[in-house]
């Protein structure tokens, strides 16, 4: 299985790859949209006007929507971080202490880069 390659960037409420949107983050009021009709104009000259209405179920605050967008946009980076971690050798080598220190340093660097993207840095 393949996915749209990164990097992904946030543009308004959408997550974009280089060429097209890959996801949209819900913000503000959310619910089910449905078509409806309303009467507009003076009483003797009223016309029926179609419009979209919504049954609201809740609201996603702007801060949470932004945090969700950051998390989604960081997905390709987190996948790459996990692939790098999976490639690392086991804890045994000629010098186990040096190897362990290198593994910890590499893991820390990989994790910090992914965390920074999730947190919008």
Image (cartoon, helix red, strand yellow):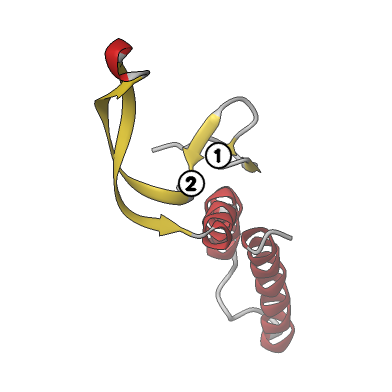
- Lower sequence index among marks 1 and 2: 1
**At numbered mark 2, what does the secondary structure look like: helix, strand or loop?**
loop
Q: CA distance from mark 1 to mark 2?
A: 6 Å
The residue indicated by pointer 2 is 25
Q: Does residue 121 lie above or below 32 as drawn?
A: below
Farthest residue toward the bottom?
97
The residue indicated by pointer 1 is 14
Q: Residue at x 64, y 66 (%)?
A: 115
Q: What is the crowding at mark 2: few (fewer than 14 residues within 10 Å), some, or many (at least 20)?
A: some
**Picture quarter containing residue 118?**
bottom right
Q: Does residue 98 lie above or below 9 as drawn?
A: below
**At numbered mark 1, what does the secondary structure look like: helix, strand or loop?**
strand
**Picture quarter containing residue 58?**
bottom left
Task: Name the spot of residue 40 as percent of width and height, x first.
Answer: 35, 21
Q: Determine which of the numbered discs, if any, sits on residue 92 in the image.
A: none
Q: How many marks?
A: 2
Pointer 1 and pointer 2: residues touching (CB < 8 Å)? Answer: yes
Q: Residue at x 59, y 35 (%)?
A: 16
Q: Does residue 35 lie above or below 76 as drawn?
A: above
Quadrant for the N terminus in the image: top left
Task: Name the spot of residue 21 as percent of width and height, x first.
Answer: 54, 31
Quadrant for the C terminus in the image: bottom right
Farthest residue toward the front?
44
Is residue 106 shown left or right of residue 2? right
**Picture quarter containing residue 9?**
top right
Comparing 101 with 118, the one in front is 118
Q: What is the crowding at mark 1: few (fewer than 14 residues within 10 Å), some, or many (at least 20)?
A: some
Q: Does residue 102 lie above or below 50 as drawn?
A: below
Is residue 121 shown left or right of residue 82? right
Q: Residue at x 32, y 11 (%)?
A: 45
Q: Residue at x 64, y 61 (%)?
A: 114
């Amino acid at each position: 299985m393949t996915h749209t390659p990164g990097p992904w960037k946030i543009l308004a409420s959408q997550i974009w790859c280089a060429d097209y949107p890959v996801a949209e983050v819900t913000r503000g009021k959310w619910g089910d949209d449905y078509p409806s009709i309303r009467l507009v104009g003076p009483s003797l000259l009223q016309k029926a006007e179609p419009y979209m209405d919504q049954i609201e179920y809740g609201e996603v605050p702007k801060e949470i929507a932004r945090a969700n967008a950051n998390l989604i946009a960081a997905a390709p980076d987190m996948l790459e971080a996990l692939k790098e971690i999976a490639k690392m050798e086991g804890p045994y080598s000629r010098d186990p202490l040096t190897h362990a220190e290198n593994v910890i340093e590499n893991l820390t660097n990989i994790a910090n880069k992914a965390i920074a993207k999730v947190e919008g840095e």
